[in-house]
Amino acid sequence: MEKKDIDKFLELPLAELIARADKIRRRFAGNRVELCNILNAKSGLCSEDCKFCAQSARHKTGTQAYPLKSKAEMLEAARHAKEIGAERFDIVTSGDKLSPEDFGVIVDAIREITAEVKIKMCASLGSMGDKEFCLLKAAGLSRYHHNIESSPRFFAKIVSTHTFEDRLKTIKAAKRAGLEVCSGGIIGMGETMDDRIQMALILKELKVDSVPLNILVPIVGTPLGNNPVLSGEEVIRTIAIFRIILKDKIIKIAAGRESVFKDFQALGFMAGANGMLIGGYLTIKGRSVAEDQQLVSQVEKLWQA
């Protein structure tokens, strides 16, 4: 699909754009919502300077910092994830690289969770190479999460301590190891719609399997703390365009959906989304599990109608 074709979709009335995206979702992605639960297993004190992130040591946000949780805590969190209906459990750590000791603990935890809890395992552990990914896959990891955040042009405006190409290297290494890849980004950081389209086209070229779309929640103390919150219509248009470009991929509504959509979150799923995080985010509390379970039930009934 060429850029000029995508631009034509942007000119459509919102209702027609939603209908187009929903038709593509039904044809290529089916009628099921994928649920993922994440554990913030190591928080804060990150050396990177991502302008949107509350966990950077360069920003004064008051975010709680703690070292890597124990294997027992990870196992308990995985059991809870399965209890609340998550299909996937994601171990997430702050920082660009793990120490060998922390990496070893996580590999052991993934192995035990896969054997005992029997939930699909994901991880978001920063930059990794071929050797680490092979070890993770052998332990039972099925999907690696590593966002590209935005377009190459805009990435340089929000991060200076690593490059867009660094992100791509990690994603390609995960793919070489035979892992699925979850990669998306954040909208509402000041980027243009063209930046978002470029991000979607790159994700399509990378053949990622799942695409989380976070909506910036401005956090006091970060350089983006005063950014205005996106309108619901702009978010809906973005979700729809991602579905039209990515067709059969999982498009996951992540952080920020509560603040933008409030009680109308089903709109995001009618516009092409087919996945979400349940049970909260890294440093932001989400809705209750019961509310999200009810939302999923409502969405899947609408899809079957």
Image: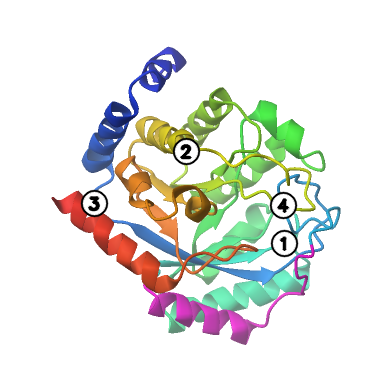
Q: In this view, which residue lies farthest toward the top?
A: 4
Amino acid under disc 3: Asn
Q: Which residue is mark 4?
A: 53
Please say whether residue 271 is one of the residues in the magenta stretch. Answer: no
Asked whether, in this view, residue 66 is left or right of residue 211, the answer is right
Amino acid under disc 2: Val
- First in sequence: mark 3 vs mark 4: 3
Spot occupied by residue 187 in the image (x, y as percentages of width and height): 57, 39
What element does badge 2 sit on? Answer: helix
The residue that appears at 62% across and 30% down in the rendered structure is 151
In this view, the mark in front (3 or 4): 4
The residue that appears at 32% across and 28% down in the rendered structure is 17
In this view, the mark in front (1 or 4): 4
- First in sequence: mark 3 vs mark 1: 3
Instruction: Work out whether 212 lies above or below 232.
Output: below
Q: Which residue is mark 3?
A: 31
In this view, the mark in front (3 or 2): 2
Q: Which mark is residue 235?
A: 2
